[in-house]
Image: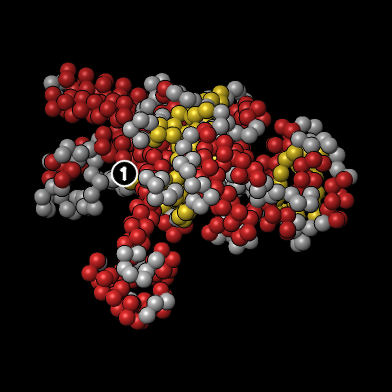
Amino acid sequence: MEYLRDKVHKLTDKPGVYLMKDKGGNIIYVGKAKRLKNRVSSYFRKNSQHNEKVRRMVSQVQDFDFIVTDSEFEALVLECSLIKQYNPKYNILLKDDKGYHYVWISPAPYSKITAEKQKPQDGTILGPYTSSFAVTQTVDEANRVFMLPTCSRRFPQEIGRGRPCLNYYIKQCSGVCTGKISAADYADTVNQAVAYMKNGSAASVEELKAQMLEASENLQFERAALIRNRIQAMQKIAETQKVLLKNEQDLDTIAMAVNGQTVCFAVLKFRNGRLRDKEHFIYHDIYDAKEARSEFLTRYYAQHNDYPKILFLDDEPSDLPLLQEFLNRLSGRTVQIRIPQRSEGHKLIQLAMSNATEQLSYKVSRTGREIQALDELTRLLGLDKTPEYIEAYDISNLGDSGIVGGMVVFQNGRPLKSAYKRFSIRQTQTRDDYASMREMLDRRLRHYVEEKESGTGFGRLPDLILLDGGKGHVAVVREMIEKYGLSVPLFGMVKDDRHRTRAIAVEGGEIAINAQKQAFALVTRIQDEVHRFTIQFQRNVRKKTAFEMELTRVQGIGPKKALALLSHFKTKKAIKEATAEELRAVAKISLEKAEELRLWIAEML
């Protein structure tokens, strides 16, 4: 480490690229820097607050090289090139493992059109294509428009054998198996379908219109009607495939979903207003989502040569101007980068986000709603990372029976009931919610300081603290957090007059939350759960206190003996099942009095 620090001191402040190497001389990380000395030295400073991934990488670094460039943009281009060349272990890698896909037209007669992953050895082949989505969509469209068979039957061997399948009756197959279509007519239909796939719907529609007109003039009305139906099917599919686009635009929509340190990027590619391809990429050990977004975008477009005119993003990357220049240079024209907040663009972002969350939920065994809720909450509150571990607090005081507090924990959007905690408020004897909340959080944070080496239970610091209360509660708890020199995002949960979640409280005011559907549902659930848990604890305390008072009605049992009995046996069931000897030992009374107490308890319970 001393060798590396000494080497860093000799670095230049110019922009460039650095290459981290392990003890075998292998390049394990490539990065760019606006100022090489500042960036590289940050890895080797003492007491650096690196995340786990960076710590692992630094622990393996034995040496580094660097290349000076004239600008940060040149450094970005060089970085992309070197990453592609060396595939470093600790860079986000865009692995090209999609393979190739083909459209296969099987040999005549009675050819079938299918999507294939392996290159067939006979028949007619269209491709190769890199997008399985585009191939599958094209084949499905062609088969639907031209009503070609997609079943497993072989023709002409099985013509006339058995009844037609369901597709024939719902007008999705012309019924070759019935024997009513000649081989010549079928071959002509297949040729039209192939032309449709090669030339697109617009050219095919014009050609079919000419054929329909010719058939009508020759009084071939059945053929003209068949062609008309195909034209209508093409136009209907074209309308549905525009998805949400009103104009024939070329644009990409990219959104990111996050769950802990795992992220998923979804890419939707629209060409001429139609959804032509969709991809998703999942990465682990991601600790900085904003930086990951920038890295992904540069890697993705560095490996593609199909650039959109417009790029919709779900959030702003960390180096937007650099990305803008990078895309402009790659495409040879201006690529508009937008972060849409409303209208059509926002709907497309929501569509991409839905794809990302569903793919990620499958990967991490969480529902798409849970992932989206945490993602929305992260953005809404401006958090640096997804709040994987959330603690929520509430205070309850029913009458004069004492004040209690409750803590519930939500991990990855779900209740973690094993981590719930109850607090009996001791120092505050009056109805002072602020003082009670301060006492509860003071004790909780003190436990963290004492137990943090364990990393579990109270020894784990939450990613987010939510209080059932307003900005006043936030202010008093903020004092407790600062008292222990900690840094934890802190917010309140505000209710309306009907005790329903209304907003998020901060020290400066409130944040509206009802527009973020999934985040709103999650916060409401957390607030309802912490309230339920705390109220239940309060009711149990009241019942215990009432029973304790009842015990003092037995002669020889005072408040101290009653409290000792309840503290030892914990529950009414346990004290009811206790023997006279057990009662005598705990209450320190005679066996005669213990038997009298046992009979009284049996009668009362």
Could one spot residue 136 in this view of the protein? yes
Residue 175, image x, y percentages? 16, 42
Relative placement, left or right, of 423 versus 35 is left
- The picture places residue 557, in percent across and down from the top left corner, at 37, 69
Q: Nearer the viewer, residue 84 or 352?
A: 352
Numbered disc 1: secondary structure: strand
Give the residue type at disc 1.
Ile
Residue carrying label 1: 113
Q: Residue at x 55, y 57 (%)?
A: 458
Decide: is 10 above or below 236.
Answer: below
Image point (63%, 29%), residue name:
320
> Which of the 4 image quadrants contains residue 575?
bottom left
Q: Is residue 458 above or below residue 215?
A: below
Q: Residue at x 25, y 66 (%)?
A: 605
Instruction: Choose between 39 and 439: the one closer to the eye.
Output: 439
**Where residue 525 sits in the image (x, y, percent)?**
38, 43
Q: Position of residue 281 (x, y in %)?
A: 51, 46
Is residue 529 at least partly visible in the picture? no
Q: Nearer the viewer, residue 195 or 99?
A: 99
The residue lying toward the viewer, choosing from 404 and 293, is 404
Q: Quadrant of residue 503?
A: top left
